Image (spheres, rainbow, N blue to C red):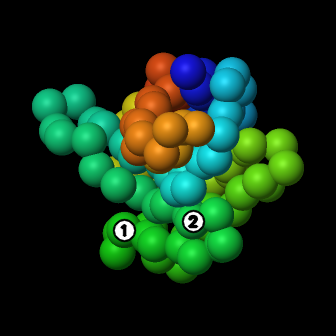
Amino acid sequence: QVHLVESGGGLVQAGGSLRLSCVASGIIFRIDVMGWYRQAPGKQRDLVAEIGRGGTTNYADSVKGRFTISRDNAKNTVYLQMASLKPEDTAVYYCNARAVDSRGRELDYWGQGTQVTASS
């Protein structure tokens, strides 16, 4: 079982920056991909950015050039540096981890979410 805890959300003026962190704990065999998703009220949960164990990244078009995802495999931690925030970035941000257990089973874990609000 893997437990994800996010931190770093908050309220910021448009144009500002925030850094989200997510730490994975518990019985961890291997985490392959870690990522961030977001969900605004009345909308579906969408991918923001994800990063593979080797550092390969993938970003939503809407955040390219403004957000940077990184991870520390030794600490089982993923970060999301957000810059030039826009009101449309306002959402609950969820950490995701796609892991493999000792039996080779693929498992999907989610954090509890952290609110990010960019005010205009």
**Image spot of residue 68 (x, y percent):** 62, 67
**Image spot of residue 117 (x, y percent):** 48, 36
Q: Nearer the viewer, residue 44 or 87?
A: 44
Contact, CB < 8 Å: mark 1 with mark 2?
no
- Which quarter shows the N terminus? top right
Q: Is residue 32 left or right of residue 23?
A: left
Q: Give the amino acid type for the residue marked by disc 1 in the picture.
A: Ala
How many numbered marks does the figure carry? Answer: 2
Mark 2 neighbour class, 10 Å CA radius: few under 14, some 14 to 19, many 20 or more: some
Q: Which mark is residue 52?
A: 2
Q: Give the amino acid type for the residue marked by disc 2 in the picture.
A: Gly
Query: Label 1 to label 2, Cα distance in Å?
Result: 15 Å
Provide the secondary structure element on which disc 2 rests.
strand
Q: Which mark is residue 91?
A: none
Residue 62, quarter of picture: bottom left
Q: Is residue 105 above or below residue 9?
A: below
Provide the secondary structure element on which disc 1 rests.
loop
Q: Is residue 89 left or right of residue 77?
A: left
Q: Nearer the viewer, residue 32 or 96?
A: 32
**Image spot of residue 59 (x, y percent):** 44, 70
Q: Which residue is mark 1?
A: 60
Q: Nearer the viewer, residue 39 or 28?
A: 28
Q: Earlier in the sequence, mark 1 or mark 2?
A: 2
Q: Residue furthest right?
A: 74
Q: Nearer the viewer, mark 1 or mark 2?
A: 2
Residue positioned 69% across, 22% down in the render: 26
